[in-house]
Image: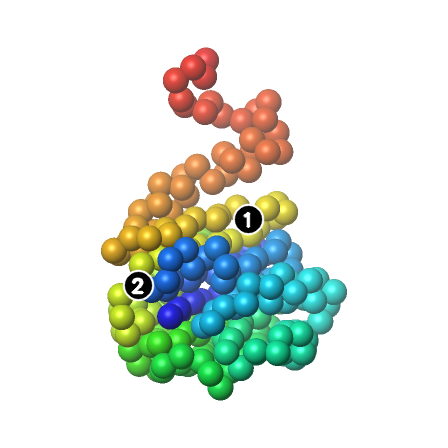
């Protein structure tokens, strides 16, 4: 019910993921990112506890393939899961259990991974990898382009209704955490939200670090 892409930018240290699904509010339970550590995706029949576990292990220096083994060891129903782990160095590991739904596939590339289930065709993850590797610019934009490429390649067999874009940078909190929880065209809506958020992103970081020198909030009553 989901297809997703994760990536890191070695030049900036940014890392994040983009995800979409026919299920409501997919990013709330499937996407996990930690600054300076990595990205974890847990989808298909989702167990959200596996995301924070993966990030904790990555933070301890555990390699992504060993993280997958540890996740499997803690989940007696791992055959229902589809998992992706990407560390800050761009190393990745992916897993699809025997009970993954419908057509499912995974792909790994340079500083990225992609996967999906209930797909229209098994080429979708590789289409996302290709789009990510060929793109340039801000990591959030590259992730969104990759998600759009997955949709263009066929995407999920049925319509998708939710999407999310989650990304970390130097601050400890996610600098991009955008969600479309229910919409007839969630990826198009997510791009609109990103286009409106991008010009304001740095201002929110400045407000946290140096509020005295932050720009005006630009709202009634802010004089």
CB within 8 Å, label 1 to label 2: no
Q: Is residue 22 above or below residue 141?
A: below
Give percent across and percent down for residue 20: 38, 62
Q: Report helix, strand or loop for mark 1.
A: strand
The residue that appears at 45% across and 25% down in the rendered structure is: 217
Question: Does residue 111 show up?
Answer: no
- Answer with the quarter of the image where residue 150 lies: bottom left
State which quarter of the image contains the N terminus: bottom left
Residue that label 2 marks: 160
Give percent across and percent down for residue 116: 41, 74
Q: Is residue 106 above or below residue 221?
A: below
The residue that appears at 50% across and 78% down in the rendered structure is: 80
Q: Report helix, strand or loop for mark 2.
A: loop
Cα gap from disc 1 to disc 2, whole angstroms: 24 Å
Residue that label 1 marks: 174
The residue that appears at 45% across and 80% down in the rendered structure is: 100
């Amino acid at each position: 019910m989901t297809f997703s892409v994760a990536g890191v930018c070695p030049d900036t240290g940014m890392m994040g993921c983009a995800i979409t699904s026919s299920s409501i509010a997919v990013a709330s339970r499937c996407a996990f990112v930690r600054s300076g550590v990595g990205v974890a995706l847990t989808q298909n029949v989702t167990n959200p506890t596996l995301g924070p576990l993966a990030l904790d292990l990555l933070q301890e220096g555990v390699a992504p393939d060993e993280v997958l083994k540890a996740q499997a060891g803690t989940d007696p129903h791992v055959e229902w899961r589809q998992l992706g782990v990407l560390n800050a160095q761009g190393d990745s590991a992916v897993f699809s259990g025997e009970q993954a739904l419908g057509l499912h596939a995974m792909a790994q590339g340079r500083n990225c991974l992609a996967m999906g289930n209930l797909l229209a065709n098994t080429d979708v993850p590789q289409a996302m990898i290709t789009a990510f590797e060929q793109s340039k610019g801000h990591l959030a934009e590259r992730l969104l382009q990759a998600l759009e490429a997955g949709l263009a390649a066929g995407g999920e067999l049925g319509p998708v209704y939710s999407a999310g874009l989650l990304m970390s940078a130097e601050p400890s909190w996610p600098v991009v955490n955008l969600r479309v929880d229910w919409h007839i065209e969630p990826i198009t809506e997510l791009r609109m939200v990103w286009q409106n958020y991008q010009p304001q992103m740095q201002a929110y970081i400045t407000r946290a670090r140096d509020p005295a020198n932050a720009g005006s909030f630009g709202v009634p009553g802010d004089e």
